[in-house]
Amino acid sequence: MKKEQKIEQDLIKKLEALGYQYNQNIRNQTALNANFRQKFNKLNGVNLSDVEFNRLMESIVSPDIFASSQTLRQVNSFERDDGTPLNYTLVNIKDWCKNDFEVINQLRINTKDSYHRYDVILLINGLPLVQIELKTLELSPRRAIAQIIDYKNDIGNGYTNTLLSFMQLFIVSNENDTLYFTNNNQQHFQFDAEEHFLPFYRFADKTNKKIARLSDFADKFLAKCTLAKMISRYMVLLAGEQKLLMMRPYQIYAVESIVNTVNKNDGNGYIWHTTGSGKTLTSFKVSTLLKANQSIDKCLFVVDRKDLDRQTREEFNKFQKDCVEENTNTYSLVQRLLSDDYANKVIVTTIQKLGLALDGTNKKNYKAELAPLKDKKIIFIFDECHRSQFGKNHEAIKDFFPKSQLFGFTGTPIFEQNSTHKTIENEEKTLVLTEDVFQKELHNYTITHAIEDKNVLRFRVDHFKADNKQQATSQKAVVEAILSKHIQATSGRKFNAILASQSINHAIEYCRLFKEIQAQKQTEDENFTPLNIACVFSPPAQGDSDIKQLQEDLAQEQADNKENPNEKKKALQEIISDYNLQFNTNHNINNFDSYYQDIQQRIKDQKYANADYPQRQKIDITIVVDMLLTGFDSQYLNTLYVDKKLKHHGLIQAFSRTNRVLNDTKPYGNIIDFKTGEDAVDNAIALFSGQEGEQQKEIWLVDAAPIVIEKLAKAVEDLEQFMALQGLENTPEAVLNLKGDEARAGFINHFKAVQKLSTQIEQYTDLEESDKKDLATIIPKDTLRGFKGVYLEVSKHLKAMQDKGEDLPDTVAQLDFEYVLFASTVIDYDYIMNLIAKYTQNTSKDKMSKTQLVSLITSDAKFIDEKEELREYIDTLELGKALDIEEIKQGYEVFKANKSADTLAEIAQKHNIKTFALKNFVSRTLERHIFDGDLFSELFTHLNLGWKERAGKETQLAKDLIPLLKKQAEDREIAGMSAYE
């Protein structure tokens, strides 16, 4: 195996060949600063004194990465010793290619609490902007990224108080596989308990072919001007969130293709980027680059609905504060179009407002006002460019703006095959082909690409099989089927769902049926928990221009509201009233937009667990007709129930609501189909995969249940063989007899594979009885739970070793525990407290023994640090002495406080220090989240020790005390404590 040092040397030679200067003398902070000072003086034509340079460093070095990134990209001001101002830049921001590019290696930054060494760093004008960490192992990307995060989050590390605060990119490579990701402040640079992973990237060419080998990556990504362009142009500073983003390769190619087409004045074009690929960011970057183009007069980003207008404007303003103003009406749009203000050069508007502005028959005659713009160069960018209103407005735009260029973004282009569809009146209607309007495809990134890149999820389609044809059309049968499948489909209500119904009348009936059937189930079963149901469809417009605009692309709803509109309105009022009672809101039909926004936000706010957002505040299923089936994104929406005919682009758009990536607990988007049929799904995949062949279906759709069960059986068999090689039976209790940490690491990896497949199959809603029997035979539920318990036990031991930074075998150091797989979506703190209360009352029909209760707790990662306390607390309770949930909660808090006090007293006695003084120190540490070294030393004052003996005593006390502090601090960091670990 090639040694890391050799990989490093080869990379440096490659970078030298690319024009970088290798500066082998920069190995410490002093040399780094001196080199930067030289580059700064040269760039700005000055010769700073020592005092001035020190003040400059104080002003630019900041622990705030976002602030440093802004400073890097702008002209800054500095007052010299003589009082004169110096306007300076840190790099040549007009032409980044004309900076100095250097490569250094083995830089050491030693501070009070961190002693870090970095493999390779790229300097631009003396500033360290790119760090490359090299490995010789086959690495887990998440583990490698986590290591850098841990490295960066050490107290007092160089990223917070040296020029390393300007770091923009991290690159990780083992020579064969290379990834990169952006630097960020801590809130955007960590794995949280739910394992939302940092976005990391593999570079690719225009056809999405990955460029993974380090030498090839260096040629394509690290060439001086390319790297400069990546940092200066294709990193986006998200002002609203104080966050750095890097555009993905396909987004960059799309931007470049549009900008080049505009520069060459080479007609129109469209970008085929799948739903969920981040086209808002792409279009924002296009608009900002075109805004700087002096030959362009206006750039209009055009959406098709009022809610998308607001959504897009908000997204743009997240990227750059107040960069897009609101167009409250058509008059406002016209005034901004006529304005010479630079702030009005980029405009987000709806196609409906644009159509009114260009309508010569409109009594306000906006078209005449816009006459001065006829000969101006205007760029139009259309979001989801195949919308129904587009055809009739296209000619008006071309006629009025002959010098315009039109660009469209779409996830589902209109081809010949999907250009014809039946309207509500059952007449054939032909949509305008994407190529007819936009002439040529400039770039594509299809759903096939996105699934392969794991940017979106695959789909699992359950085509519902009814007992007879009549039942298949019964809405009652659909409700019964949904209630039987929903818990499983949504992983115990962790996620939520949309029910797409075929008409407004069907939606109204579904609301009634869910209310009636769930109420009946509650009377029959005290343990039945009803699902939270919401419903949204547009009300009759009845002259309301906002509602009329909203309905422009909601064909079914628009047609339905023409029949008996007052009945529809009354039904919607009742639905909103029920919603108000359910969620303690105060919406009404006259402010429909507020109601609609509230529903969208609740779907997005599904995040588990109850401590963050109580289940009663969440929506389980939202019944819709046309709404929310396009343009709406939520990571917590994983299931679509389909009770309407979908095909072609409508099917892909609707299915794609479910496939946003979250973590390993969401392995795919769930589609439960009552109407569409398998042929429609196959035809849509064939049309929109972007490639031919049966293989596309295998990429888009997850394996059928028997295949997953077969894989699970193989994973269990592999675990069994691994245990046999250790001389042990394949049982949970045998795991605790594994010898050595490498053997324990082997168990972690083997059982993690079992758990991943188990998590996947648990969400299948179409398992046959034979499938269920096979699963019970392969690994019974009690056995699986037992293995999860010992997995958590073993992983806690190995994770503690990793956290201490011990010199570990590679197999242990590289472990990624993926705790999110082992945290039940159903079981949370309140659930456990309720179970304990029922255990004391012993009245529930489903009695749970103490053994079962303890087993449940110990097999869930959420309680990895509390399971001993919970187990001991349960032991103190008297069976039959009934307590309610609040009494259980209060009792548990008292129990924990007493146990902590007893533990502190034992520690104090062991180390011959005063108990009250130790308790005060712990209280103050947890209150301030600062480990005060001076106060810690004072605990030993009464012993009159010499410094050497006292230091030894402090080390021994810290060893006992720090685990307790970490536990009580939960996930919050205690500053200064790492120095004592």
Image: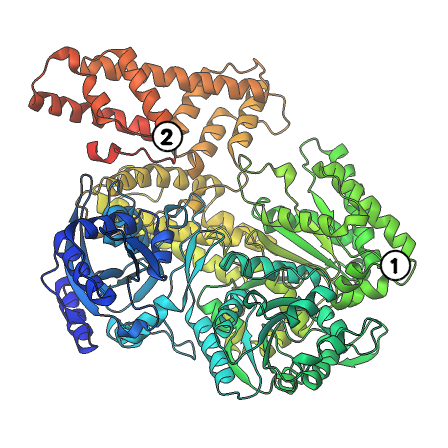
Comes first in the chain, label 2 or label 1? 1
Where residue 373 sits: x, y (%)?
66, 79
Pick the residue in front: 182 or 852.
Answer: 182
- Image quadrant assignment for residue 326: bottom right
Left/right of residue 827 with respect to residue 806 in the rendered view: right
Q: Position of residue 705 (x, y in %)?
A: 54, 59
Q: Which residue is mark 1?
A: 542
Q: Tag 2: residue type?
A: Ala
**Which quadrant holds residue 554?**
bottom right
Question: What whole-number distance in Å separates the C-alpha atoms at marks 2 and 1?
Answer: 58 Å
State the residue at coordinates (67%, 62%).
Answer: 327
Looking at the rendered structure, the secondary structure element under dot 1 is loop
| Residue 131, x across and y down, in percent | 25, 60
Residue 419 in view, yes or no? no
Tell me the residue at 50%/70% (across/down): 699
| Label 1 Cα neighbours within 10 Å, binned few <14 / some 14-19 / many ≥20 | few
Mark 2 or mark 1, whichever is nearer to me: 1
List x then y, in percent, for residue 892.
Answer: 47, 20
Q: Is residue 192 above or below residue 247?
A: above
Q: Position of 487 compared to 571: left or right?
A: left
Rendered position, 492 above or below 654: above
Residue carrying label 2: 969
Q: Amino acid at mark 1?
A: Gln
